[in-house]
Amino acid sequence: MVIGDEILSGRRRDTHVDWFRKILHNHGFSLGWVQILPDDPELLVRQLKQSMGAGERVFSCGGIGATPDDYTRQCAAKAAGVPLVRHPEAAVLIEKQFPDSAYPHRIRMADLPQGSQLIPNPVNHVPGFSIHEHYFMPGFPDMAHPMGQWVLQQYYQPDAEPEQELSLRVFGASENDLMPILEKMTRNWPQLKLFSLPRMGEVSFVELGFRGNGEMAKKAFQALQQELKQAGMKYSCGQALP
């Protein structure tokens, strides 16, 4: 989740999505979904309730500051069904970082959902927090990115069987022509994600591939190539395009 009106309005450009996609991949995981949300308390509570209720693991960037337009801390508490309380360790960190100006405003960043765990901030030491495997960090990339890296290293072992993505390009055929093969692959490999991406240009082609468990993806990819050969279709192997 990337939270902030400034992203939706274009005043600031998001840099979180690509970065988190990359570190998740390096850790053996994949990015399941992305939401870019406004500073709207009702919407934030609704979305957080949904993801918490579904048992999702979520990184959230933005909206945990002390200004009146920062709603994420309060909304996370409401979504989790717990009160917002002053976290003593967070309060000490803020008082230490801002000895002359922690009160009355900055100290509000220590008001967190009851039961929260802290996420250390290596830049200014004002922590983020986690609850129900939702990890809340500032919107500033120089803070959020090392904090996200810390979360992965602290709480999650790298996946022993990381997800793979294998693709090829089929030339001289449309998705409609490929439909029987696509349907067969979907039936035969329901545990994997099959993707089909038509590309139009000087050289048009359809990129086909699988995403999922490494060994299974390799077997499915071999089966896909065999189907294309039997159908007399021209293709070349390559990595999936961004």
Image: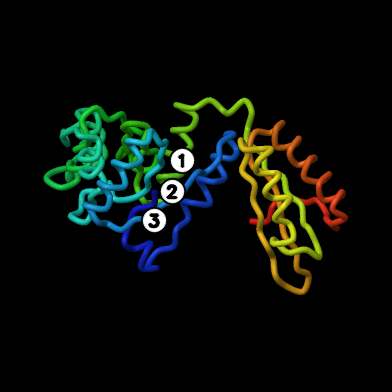
Q: Is mark 1 on a helix, strand or loop?
A: helix
Q: Nearer the viewer, residue 193 or 22?
A: 193
Task: Find disc 2 in the rendering and name its residue.
Answer: 142
Q: Cα distance, mark 3 to mark 1?
A: 20 Å
Mark closest to the chain's N terminus, 3 or 2: 3
> What mark, if any, has residue 36 been given in the picture?
3
Which dot, 3 or 2, sits closer to the camera? 3
Find out whether the residues at labels 1 and 2 contact each other: C-beta distance under 8 Å. yes
Q: What element carries label 2?
A: helix
Locate residue 109, reporting x and y percent.
22, 42
Locate residue 67, reporting x and y percent.
20, 53
Label 1 environment density (alpha carbons within 10 Å; few <14, some 14–19, many ≥20) = some
Task: Find disc 1 in the rendering and name its residue.
Answer: 146
Q: Which of 37 and 129 is in front in this view?
A: 37
Q: Cα distance, mark 3 to mark 2?
A: 19 Å
> What mark, if any, has residue 154 been given in the picture?
none
Quadrant of res 174: bottom right
